[in-house]
Image (cartoon, helix red, strand yellow):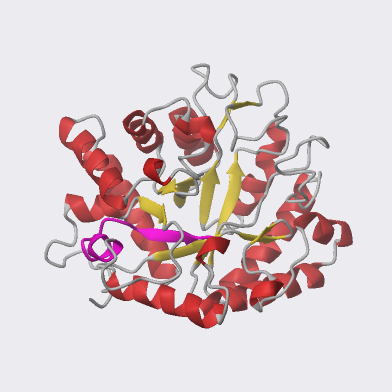
Amino acid sequence: MVATVFSATGKGIDSLDLKIGQMIMIGIGERTTLTQSDSLRAELAAGKLSGVVLFEKNLAGTATADNLRSLIKALQQEALQPLFISIDEEGGKVHRLKEKYGFFALPTAAHLGRLDNPDSTLYYNRKLAMLLKELRFNVNYAPSVDMAVNPRNTVIVTAERSFSRSASSVAKHAALCIQAHREHGVATVLKHFPGHGSSNTDSHFGLVDVTNTWKREELRPYDTLIQAGFADAVMVAHIINRNWDNSMLPATLSQRVVGGMLRKDLGFKGVVFSDDMQMKAIADHYGLERAIVLAINAGVDVLMFANTIPDAAHRVSPSQIHDAIKKLVLKGTISPKQIDESYKRIVLLKGKYP
């Protein structure tokens, strides 16, 4: 099946099933090809997912670029609607397209921030964005606009994923990164809202409480980029702060954070992505249905299930997530209006970055 173009009036195009499917982002396990018998083909054809996130494990060891293009082409051809084909490419430690596969090295955000040379930031990000476009990616989960607030922070700061301690410097280099990606037709996703650079722990491994460490200054890069029109999408983090939400819900699941801080206070009108819903901060404390209800009702548009967990038995399929969301909508636990609003935002973003 050839991927079609979105239409507001096409027969069945606005069905509840299709709209729900557009809210689901999936990791595809260890696949490096899409075989004829692969069950994912039927889910793609049925519109059960909005897109895929690819990792290093999805790269074939030989003829990597050609094989990756073939995989992405097959995914798009099977899909009922055009897919988000996404990847984490920040440079440094968060770098999937490595030299050993025939690609190139990328400096860390911290290195570019220390250089503080706009030409260097543009050069490396143009090089990256050109590669992503050649490989047929259309979404990059970058840049990280977390500020290097806590020098002992392992998930962002010591990993050199932050451009700077300075909000203005972070915003400046993030804007250059976004500019370079836009030149090559690749959407960017600002992360990790409302700011992960002050945390003492890592949300991959459990709940992270930033009540005593987070500073409101960490919103400044987001505010600057949103007001300047540089925010295609935002990824929300699994961090908690009783000053944001005294119910102690992680930001991803909090209406006060997503609907309040991000949408109302900062005026963001674009697509909100969750961080991986299978990270321990969510998976160890909330069941699948409860996490889905809270995230969608908070205002999250695209739910990420990266399926990077080692135990394959605990990975989820697009149909499992789709069925759970549909049941919750039909029960009235999730409003159809919320689904409609997310669908419109997603379609608009896909239209900008086909």
In the image, residue 63 lies at what x, y percent?
56, 82
The x and y percentages for residue 113 are: 82, 57
Residue interval drawn in magenta: 40-55
Number of marks: 0
Residue 325: x and y in percent read 26, 40
Residue that appears at 77% across and 43% down:
157
- Tell me if 175 is positioned left or right of 245 in this view: right
Reply above or below: 178 against 136.
above
The reply, left or right, for residue 96 in relation to residue 287 is right
Quadrant location of the C terminus in the rendered image: bottom left
Residue located farthest toward the top when viewing the structure as drawn: 246
Instruction: Decide: is 123 above or below 230.
Output: below
Q: Residue at x 58, y 29 (%)?
A: 206
Q: Nearer the viewer, residue 11 or 201?
A: 201
Q: Choose between 1 and 219: the one closer to the eye.
A: 1
Q: Is residue 52 magenta?
A: yes
Question: Compared to 218, does 83 lie above or below?
Answer: below
> Taking the image as drawn, is residue 294 in sight?
yes
Q: Nearer the viewer, residue 153 or 182?
A: 153
Write the residue at 59% across / 52% down. Answer: 190
- 198 magenta-colored: no
